[in-house]
Image (cartoon, coloured by chain):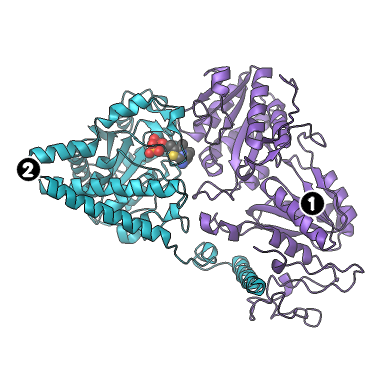
Amino acid sequence: MTRTQPLTTTQPVTMAQALNRALRDAMAADERVLMFGEDVGALGGVFRITDGLAAQFGPQRCFDTPLAEAGIVGFAVGMAMYGFRPVIEMQFDAFAYPAFEQVFSHVAKMGSRTAGRVRLPMVLRVPTGGGIGAVEHHADSGEAYYAHTAGLKVLTPSTPADAYHLLRAAIEDPDPVVVLEPKKLYWARGPLDAPAQPAGLGGAVVRRPGRDVTVVTYGVTVPLALEAADLAQAQDIDLEVVDLRALVPFDDETLVASVRRTGRCVVVHEAQGFAGMGAEIAARLQERCFHSLAAPVLRVTGLDVPYPAPRLEHHHRPDVARILQAIGRLQWDDQPDVHHLGGFPPSTPAPSSAAPMPDTRASVPAPAAPLMAPTPEPAARTDPPVTVGVSAVAR
Amino acid sequence: MERLKEAYRAMVLARRFDAQAMALAKQGRIAAYPSSLGQEACQISVAFALRPTDWLFPTYRDGNALLTRGIDPLDVLVPVRGYQHCGYDPYVHRCAPMATPLATQALHGAGLATAARCRGEDTVALVLLGDGATSEGDFHEALTFAGVFRAPVVFVIQNNQFAISVPRARQSAAPTLAHKGIGYGIAAEQADGNDVLAVLAVLDEAVAQAREGGGPRLVELHTYRMGPHTSTDDPGRYREAALTESWRRRDPIDRLAAYLRRHGGLDDAAQAGLDLDADALAATVRAGVATPPVVAPTEVIDHVYAAPPRSLAEQRAALVAELAASDVAERGTR
Ligand SMILES: Cc1ncc(C[n+]2csc(CCOP(=O)(O)OP(=O)(O)O)c2C)c(N)n1
């Protein structure tokens, strides 16, 4: 990959700046690279990711389109078919939906429809996810739709350095790539150096090594998982945090190697859980390392609801407390998870750290147990993990 | 004259409502607010042209049309207050939730209008759109459907010259947006959107035609977004202040005030009375926003299905348990 200037900066940059830099460098390196979409010209995009590109490269290479997402994607298909490498911006996650047909019927299928004769080297950038207090339709996590669609590659960075390298790799890739940019992390800072492991398409990275549980996540929830790991450490549970970075292609090796070591896994993502990435990951793990698993793979995800109004979004989004609680439910005492055996609905008020623990050992299935009860004190471990649950962290 | 006095009153209230909401947004008390400053003649006329039995399909920018239609100002602001996505009962006000995904509501309006006609009603649906939204596929499909089914629907484009940063010229090479009706066999008209007399005349006629079985109508109102796209936007990046200044001279409220004063419909005393009413409205909005409603967290789950499937009911129970536990934990630490 050609670089116009030395990449390493001493000052930490925001993810937004890193993405801007990636576009700038890619456009400088290859004049076939174009950037277009809604408000990406004079305004520099509503998140300023394209700031200054129109001024630097001119209106032929970075330009505003009419307000029509299907139009933007379909237009890019035509340009990609004929020698250009368009990078297009969907203004917000939910506003990519009008382009659904173009993405799913054409972008993803062109290679196979033409027996490989036509390749579409194009990048669909989608600001994604919530946690920013946005009004409705501005906080969706649509990764499962894209990942489910064969023919697309799907990347999602969690650091400025990865944002830079993943976007450059996406632009250079011969296939169409969807880059899901976590809006909440746009302003998070980090160094723009070479990543610890090269961020290519398909390379997960171990963000934090640990021995007891693999927490696998991507995008906006990576910092949450790292925070949870710090808190769990205080209770002597050592979490390994794997950042997938690429949802397609999927890096089974890194993940399976991690879970073989730890024997336990929790998947964390902000999108709804039902039929989401977490389900795919759990399935792949039990297919590949069933005998290494000491507990079922658990998921900590958004609720199965349309994204809530901003003042209520924190009830929907995964948080550190929910991650820690899932960690606590990983059958440390070799007892089944009351969460799934506990009957429904719970007939007693929720216990807390102040209330006595329900004795699930004596009463499995325990119809009276709440669905997210704090985990019983483990029996089998020599270094007993202190009960982690919602009470462990102030919400 | 009485109607124009009413229209003037509605515009004065609308402008104050908008200014108050903008101020609250800048203070961070409500989310990014899309002001309709300068578009008051369009907004209030829409409400004036409709009967209570008609339906309105608004966008995020049409809070003042809703206000004029009689929706509580605090309910109008509910989406930006952040507790719910829609603050009113659409059936009570015959007003769909404000649509954010551009032009999607145009098909809903065509469908509802057709349904009303099938039911033998003389209900008309009025769909509001921006100039940018006319580039979306749904706009074109809505015109196609409305034309084919001769739906009693009026599509009203508030051409405020910008779609966020993108000027009208980037949306279409057509000389006017009203021209877009031609390809769909839909009669279209334009009017000066800052002249409330013109807007009322055109909308009255379009609604009447639709009601009488004349089929759908398209109306383009030429106006200008005097403010930023929302309270978080910076128009300095993409448009000349001089352009905005030139539109200030065409202010719809100033124009109607001048007309009314010339014709004895407005004097200083009446203006002072209106200003007091506007102050009172602003005070109501401030006080209401300062008093947040109590919304149960389970609201995020409770309305997704008529009856929640078991899996969602389980998540609800988990949320309740979690809230109870954190409640106890919080009390414990105090
Ligand atoms: C399908 C879709 N794409 C993008 C957006 C983001 N967006 C919100 S408002 C807006 C500009 C709309 O311009 P216009 O239709 O002229 O209406 P105005 O905002 O000027 O009233 C854009 C691009 C959206 N809401 N929906």
User: Which chain is the one coloured purple?
Assistant: A
Q: Where's residue B155, x and y in %?
A: 31, 40
The image shows residue A324, relative to residue B186, as above or below, that is below
Please, is residue A40 above or below residue B81 in the view? above
User: What residue lies at 70% left-to-right and 52% top-to-bottom?
Assistant: A224
Q: Quadrant of residue A374?
A: bottom right
Image point 64% across, 26% down: which residue? A23
The front one of A242 and A342 is A242
Question: What residue do we see at 19% from left, 36% from top?
Answer: B255
**The CB of the residue at mark 2 lies under 8 Å from ligand 1:** no
Q: Give the image location of residue A83, x and y in percent.
A: 63, 18
Crowding at mark 2 (Cα within 10 Å: few <14, some 14-19, many 20+): few
Q: Colour of chain B?
A: cyan
Please state the horizontal and vertical placement of residue B37, each as a whole percent of the image.
32, 40
Q: What residue type is labelled 1?
A: Arg
The reply to the same-chain question for discs 1 and 2 is no
| Location of the C terminus of chain A (image quadrant) | bottom right
- Amino acid tagged 2: Gly
Which residue position holds label 2? Answer: B264
Q: In this image, B121 relative to A278: left or right?
A: left
Q: Which residue lies furthest to the right in this view?
A: A382
Instruction: For mark 1, give the secondary structure.
Output: helix
Q: Depth check: give the residue in front, B165 or A61.
A: B165
Closer to the eye: label 1 or 2: 2
Please tell me the numbered disc located at residue A284: 1
Is A357 left, or right, of B230 in this rendering?
A: right
Query: Ligand 1 appears in which quadrant?
Result: top left
Q: Which of A172 and A73 is in front in this view?
A: A172
Left or right of B97, for residue A290? right
In percent of the image, x 77 and y 42: which residue is there? A250
SS label for mark 2 = loop
